[in-house]
Image (spheres, helix red, strand yellow):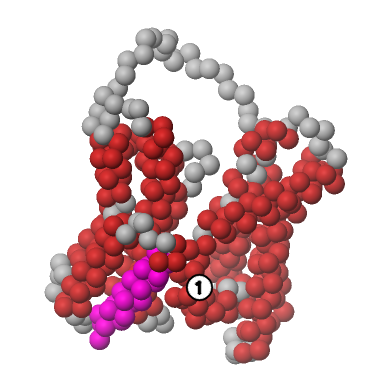
Amino acid sequence: MKNSYLHFRLRLARHALLQFALSLQSSLEYILLGFAPVLLGLLAVIALPGLFAAARPWPEALGLFLGQTLLASAPVWLLRKRLLPAAVALWSHPLPITPRDKWRADAAVAGLLVGPLGLVYAVSTAIWLYQWPDWLRPVAPQALLLTAASLLLAWLLSALTLQHRGRMPPARKPGRSRPAPTHYAPQRGGMAHYWYRLFWLPFWRAENVIGIQQTLLLSGALLSIGAWMARPPLVPPAVWGACAALMIMLLTDRGDKAVAEQIALLRPVAAGWPLRAERLYRLAALATLLPALLVLACFAALTLGRDAGGYSHTVAIVWLCAAALAQLAVVALRKLSVRGRVGLVLIAIALLTAIGSELWN
């Protein structure tokens, strides 16, 4: 039983990772084609926090160590619902599987994600050892130890995350304050009410991660805009402009794709409902522009809403107009092929990056 359960969990995890990769195929194409040099730079610095922690005072070193550990364990936490679906966890509870076998399976599944990350850590560490900077030379053994300990702790946290996911939920007593059921009274509302019920709520329920995905992309876009305007040291402003262009295009593209999939699910069901379905679908499509509109409004407030401080108002206006047209094109040209849509988003990212690079010149 233990070998069968272990093999089942590993096959389930591989299938889940494959499906996740396929769902992000177009987004990965945008990132790889547009930001390959940046990704290579990130590959070199991914092990830097653990190495650099050995050369810092203990409060700062502890923060770097814990931050790197949490970041390394984040993929398992984000994908926990795919790696161990609720139906599989519920199905496995009555089976004669010992806690030790379940722990072995959770540890093996966590290793599927943390193991490749360990190879990336090894490459990044080798790059820094080859560079051999002055700050690394006196603390090289401690730095290697901290990096290995961070990776091992990330694997442990990932396995504990899956173990907690697979626990039997505690039984709950029905609340006594719950009102007694009465006759059903249908609710009436406008298009905004139906949009909220049929599009907003489903993106946050059960195993759907669209709401979390869009929240992270919106946060990334706003942070990129803020960093672009603040111009922190060591990072050129053009890099933050490229990140802002990438985030805002992915924000609208992923949102529009999710709405299109939801519309495809609703069409056969809502055909007999007493509502104007096509009008509702158009409203849902237009609503995908609202997050990007918020980002553009923040950019306009930070650039056009104050006196020029070394940046060009003209470039800011051109960037805003180009970004707005790009968002409208993503929603309006929904019937493009997959390759055509990838090309549209890539061209928009490249164009916005080129325009944004002139903002501070």
Please name whichever residue, 220 or 261, is drawn nearer the observer in this view of the structure.
261
- Give left or right: position of 3 versus 343: right
Callout count: 1
Residue 329's place in the image compared with 159, above or below, is: below
Position of the C terminus, as image quadrant, is bottom left
Q: Which residues are magenta?
A: 341-361
- Residue 196 in the image: state x and y as whole percent: 32, 37
Residue 359 or residue 54, whichever sits in front = 359
With 301 as the anchor, is 87 left or right in this view?
right
Q: Main secondary structure of the magenta part?
A: helix
Q: Amino acid at mark 1?
A: Leu
Drawn side of residue 212 relative to residue 323, left or right? right
* The stretch drawn in magenta includes residue 354: yes
Picture quadrant where residue 182 is located: top left
Seen in the picture, residue 327 relative to 57 is either above or below; the reply is above
The reply to whether residue 349 is visible in this rendering is: no
Q: Position of residue 13 (x, y in %)?
A: 68, 51
**Residue at (36, 13) in percent of width and height:** 184
Mark 1 burial class by Cα count in 10 Å: few <14, some 14-19, many 20+: few
Q: State the residue at coordinates (49%, 81%).
A: 37
* Magenta stretch: includes residue 353: yes
On screen, residue 263 above or below 271: below
Residue nearer the viewer, 223 or 337: 337
Residue position for label 1: 32
Tell me where residue 231 appears, x and y as whole percent.
32, 77
The quadrant of the picture occupied by the N terminus is: top right
Tell me the residue at 40%/64% (across/down): 341
